[in-house]
């Protein structure tokens, strides 16, 4: 292990080296709410405005829409239903313009499932070599990750920089996704071209539960980066005491098992 002096000098280098370089394009906001009349006058227009503000945040839940529509008079109901239908058409066009990777990142299951079924894109790579599964893992979309894995997504695929779905999930501390990927038999010690492993990314993010899960699943805490720092060095340099304690406890158990 590096000395404390070296850690003080190299702490910034460790942080920079282990900081994720995964660059996901920004996700466009999908907004389908039209400009509505917000005047204070009471009447059908105001009812429609209030209705749309209530309905739209519920992501086009037609059960919610129906309950609300029934509470209004026939004229208001027709106006609202026309508005909802219009919004659904706009949303459909917008979602069709998104890639399967963006749909996976946003958790748009219906559109994603349709695109994957129609175009066989479940393991399709973007320009960085990222698959829909990797995007979903990076954005914490648990349901999407589960859906993709159940339908043949390959969790072993690596990006151009050897990025993995597991490392992406670990860098954000998405423990449920980490567990799912580990259950699929992915390499817990897979490294990328930054010299980072899933454990190192979890340590860097101060994700204590994630660190514990990885160690219990066989992650090697002695693996070093290209600069010669391991997970304990990183935890100490960043001042992550809880992570440090988890690693120390794991190492003590390993030593006890060796003695026995």
Image (cartoon, grey):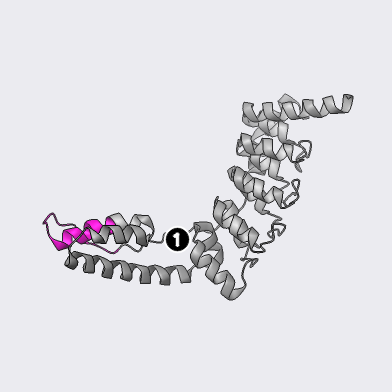
Which of the two residues, 126 or 258, is positioned nearer the viewer here? 258
Residue 248 place in picture, x, y as percent:
73, 26
Q: Is residue 23 visible?
A: no
Q: Is residue 182 above or below residue 81?
A: above
Q: Is residue 229 above or below residue 115?
A: above
Question: SS of the residue at dot 1?
Answer: loop
Neighbourhood count class around disc 1 (C-alpha, 10 Å): few under 14, some 14–19, many 20 upward: few
Question: Residues in magenta?
Answer: 34-53
Q: Which quadrant is home to the N terminus?
A: top right
Q: Residue drawn at (39%, 58%), measured in percent from left and top?
A: 59
User: Looking at the image, which residue sits at the far bottom?
Assistant: 118
Say how many tags the image has: 1
Q: Which quarter of the picture shows residue 151?
A: bottom right
Which of the two residues, 105 or 49, is positioned nearer the viewer here? 49
Q: Is residue 209 left or right of residue 223?
A: left
Q: Is residue 258 magenta?
A: no
Q: Which quadrant is home to the C terminus?
A: top right
Q: Is residue 36 left or right of residue 32?
A: left
Which of the two residues, 12 or 176, is positioned nearer the viewer here? 176
Residue 69 place in picture, x, y as percent:
25, 61
Q: Is residue 51 magenta?
A: yes
Residue 209 place in picture, x, y as percent:
62, 36
Residue that carries the numbered disc 1 in the rendered image = 28
Q: Residue drawn at (17%, 58%), measured in percent from left and top?
A: 46
Q: Is residue 71 visible?
A: yes
Q: Residue drawn at (68%, 38%), measured in percent from left and top?
A: 213
Q: Residue drawn at (20%, 60%), measured in percent from left and top?
A: 72
Residue 235 place in picture, x, y as percent:
67, 31
Which of the two residues, 48 or 70, is positioned nearer the viewer here? 70
């Amino acid at each position: 292990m590096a000395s404390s002096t070296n850690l003080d000098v190299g702490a910034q280098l460790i942080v920079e080296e282990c900081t994720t370089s995964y660059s996901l394009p920004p996700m466009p906001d999908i907004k389908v709410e039209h400009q509505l009349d917000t005047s204070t006058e009471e009447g059908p227009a105001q009812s429609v405005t209030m209705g749309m503000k209530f309905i739209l945040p519920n992501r086009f839940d037609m059960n919610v829409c129906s309950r609300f529509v029934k509470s209004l008079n026939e004229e208001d109901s027709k106006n609202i239903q026309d508005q909802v239908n219009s919004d659904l058409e706009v949303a459909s066009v917008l979602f069709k313009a998104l890639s399967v990777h963006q749909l996976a990142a946003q958790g748009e299951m219906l559109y994603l499932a349709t695109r994957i079924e129609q175009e066989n894109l479940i393991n399709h790579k973007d320009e960085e070599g990222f698959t829909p599964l990797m995007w979903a893992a990076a954005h914490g979309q648990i349901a999407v990750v589960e859906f993709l894995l159940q339908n043949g997504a390959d969790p072993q695929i690596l990006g151009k920089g050897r990025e993995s779905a597991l490392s992406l999930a670990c860098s954000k501390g998405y423990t449920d996704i980490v567990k799912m990927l580990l259950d699929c038999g992915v390499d817990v010690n897979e490294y990328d071209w930054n010299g980072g492993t899933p454990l190192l990314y979890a340590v860097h993010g101060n994700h204590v539960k994630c660190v514990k899960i990885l160690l219990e699943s066989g992650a090697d805490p002695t693996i070093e980066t290209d600069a010669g720092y391991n997970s304990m060095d990183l935890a100490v340099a960043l001042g992550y005491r809880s992570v440090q304690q988890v690693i120390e406890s794991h190492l003590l158990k390993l030593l006890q098992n060796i003695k026995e």
